[in-house]
Image: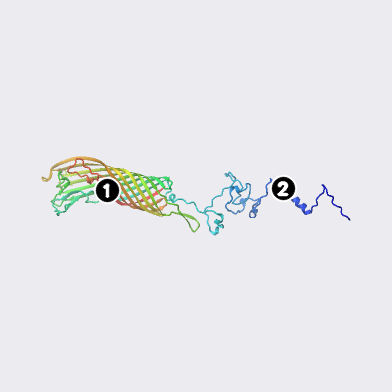
């Protein structure tokens, strides 16, 4: 049977195999289904997250890894899971509908962690804070110390000597002499209190502060006396023309000296550098301060007060003072005011520190003294001066002065902001009217005044300091 030939023309229908027809039907069905889903392209899900599709992310365990995608690289509406929840879902308080990545804290490079930090390029170092914030992290600071000081001896003056004791030739001071330096002073307690406020840091990262320091409360007192040998008398060269002194059998002195000081200073001091970060065997980081020298500059003003009282008395045995005796009293007042310049150098360690601090104050010295004398001799005849005397005088002077102090100290940091300390201190005051330089028993000068005195103090100090 002869086959019918194909007739070409516009109505010719191409011949399709059954497989081709099935493929075309599947494609058309896919277009229809895709249109019903909003025209969106089908998302490609990694095979390791394929089991999370159409499931509640909170109901399954998700591999928690930090996000390494920038916000602009994530396609809105995507459900790709790269953290503990889908990043494509909106979050309350997030304007862009994106979740922020929280920092990883207390991470470790141990094998049991199941990750390598190098692969994720993460920085596990904690924030490095200056140890200046560690040792002094408050706004205020202060110290309180107790001092035990010794005072230098008085200006040496010969008060009296025994008339019957022979003095070898060439000896300036007679044998059996009574002087103003015969008795040393005892140790006197005092205090040194500092209160300061931090003003912040300058452009070189140095601390600036204002501080007030009280230094004083020192009160030195001594009493001394001298007796003539039996059947003898005492000679008082300072009162050879005044009745009631030469011819006495007992001489006595009492001396009181007081020191106080106030300072207001501006302090600029260096801070410690960055702390050393040390990793412990358990993987935790800890801060440790590194030792450094911390210099400081101090400038301000200082007011110092030194007051002294000296009493000199004479008596005869079994004789009423109204018949024979003398009372000589000297009061001196000294006020020094000037600019205060100083510095500090401390070796600061993590658990202890030591260093030195010094201040010098060239000052203007306002000095004054008042004297009173009352004496009588109605018992001894000539050559002893008879009669009585009752007089008083006063004088004052404006002169240059100086105040300086030096402290050597060491301390232990009980906590970063509290420490115990101890030291040895020196203090020098010059250009003042000390009481034992003002003697005028013979009334040689009408208004005697000597502002060339000086006092040297030294002793131990111990206390505590801290910041808050």
Q: Which residue is drawn at 22% across and 40% down?
A: 394
The circle on residue 207 is: none
Name, please, the residue furthest toward the front.
8
- Residue 242 is situated, as x and y percent measured from the top left of the image, at 15, 43
In this picture the colour scheme is rainbow
Name, please, the residue furthest toward the left.
382
State the quadrant of the N terminus. bottom right
* Numbered disc 2: secondary structure: helix
Q: Is residue 413 left or right of residue 159?
A: right
The residue tagged 2 is 33
* Numbered disc 1: secondary structure: strand
The residue tagged 1 is 455
Q: Is residue 167 left or right of residue 86?
A: left
Q: How crowded is mark 1: few (under 14 residues within 10 Å), some or many (20 or more)?
A: some
- Residue 52 is situated, as x and y percent measured from the top left of the image, at 64, 52
Q: In this view, does 240 lie to the left or right of 421?
A: left
């Amino acid at each position: 049977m002869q086959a019918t030939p194909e007739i070409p023309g516009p109505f010719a229908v191409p011949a399709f195999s059954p497989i081709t027809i099935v493929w075309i039907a599947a494609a058309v069905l896919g277009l229809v289904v895709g249109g019903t889903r909003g025209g969106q392209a089908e998302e490609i899900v990694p095979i390791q997250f394929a089991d999370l599709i159409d499931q509640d992310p909170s109901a399954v365990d998700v591999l928690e890894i930090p996000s390494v995608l920038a916000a602009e690289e994530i396609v809105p509406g995507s459900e790709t899971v790269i953290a503990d929840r889908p990043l494509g879902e909106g979050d309350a308080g997030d304007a862009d509908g994106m979740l922020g990545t929280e920092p990883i804290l207390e991470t470790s490079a141990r094998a049991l962690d199941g990750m390598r930090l190098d692969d994720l390029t993460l920085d596990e170092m904690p924030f490095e804070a200056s140890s200046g914030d560690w040792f002094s992290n408050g706004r205020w600071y202060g110290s309180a110390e107790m001092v035990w000081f010794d005072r230098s001896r008085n200006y040496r003056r010969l008060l009296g000597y025994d008339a019957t004791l022979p003095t070898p030739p060439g000896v300036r001071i007679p044998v059996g002499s009574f002087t103003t330096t015969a008795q040393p002073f005892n140790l006197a307690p005092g205090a040194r209190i500092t209160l300061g406020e931090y003003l912040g840091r300058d452009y070189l990262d140095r601390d600036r502060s204002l501080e007030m320091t009280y230094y004083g409360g020192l009160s030195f007192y001594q009493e001394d006396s001298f007796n003539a040998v039996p059947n003898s008398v005492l000679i008082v060269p300072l009162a050879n023309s005044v009745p009631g002194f030469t011819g006495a059998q007992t001489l006595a002195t009492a001396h009181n000296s007081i020191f106080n000081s106030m300072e207001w200073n501006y302090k600029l001091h260096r801070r410690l550098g960055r702390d050393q970060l040390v990793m412990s065997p358990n993987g935790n980081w800890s801060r440790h301060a590194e030792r450094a020298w911390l210099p400081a500059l101090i400038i301000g003003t200082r007011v110092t007060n030194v007051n002294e009282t000296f009493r000199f008395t004479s008596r005869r045995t079994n004789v009423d003072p109204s018949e024979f005796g003398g009372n000589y009293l000297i009061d001196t007042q000294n006020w020094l005011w000037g600019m205060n310049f100083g510095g500090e150098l401390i070796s600061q360690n993590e658990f202890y520190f030591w260093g030195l601090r010094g201040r010098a104050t060239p000052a203007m010295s306002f000095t004054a003294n008042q004297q009173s004398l009352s004496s009588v001799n109605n018992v001894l005849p000539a050559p002893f001066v008879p009669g009585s005397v009752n007089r008083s005088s006063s004088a004052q002077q404006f002169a240059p002065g100086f105040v300086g102090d030096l402290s050597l100290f060491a301390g232990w940091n009980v906590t970063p902001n509290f420490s115990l300390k101890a030291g040895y201190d020196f203090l020098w005051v010059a250009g003042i009217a000390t009481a034992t330089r003002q003697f005028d028993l013979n009334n040689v000068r009408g208004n005697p005044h000597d502002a060339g005195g000086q006092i040297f103090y030294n002793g131990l100090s111990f206390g505590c300091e801290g910041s808050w």
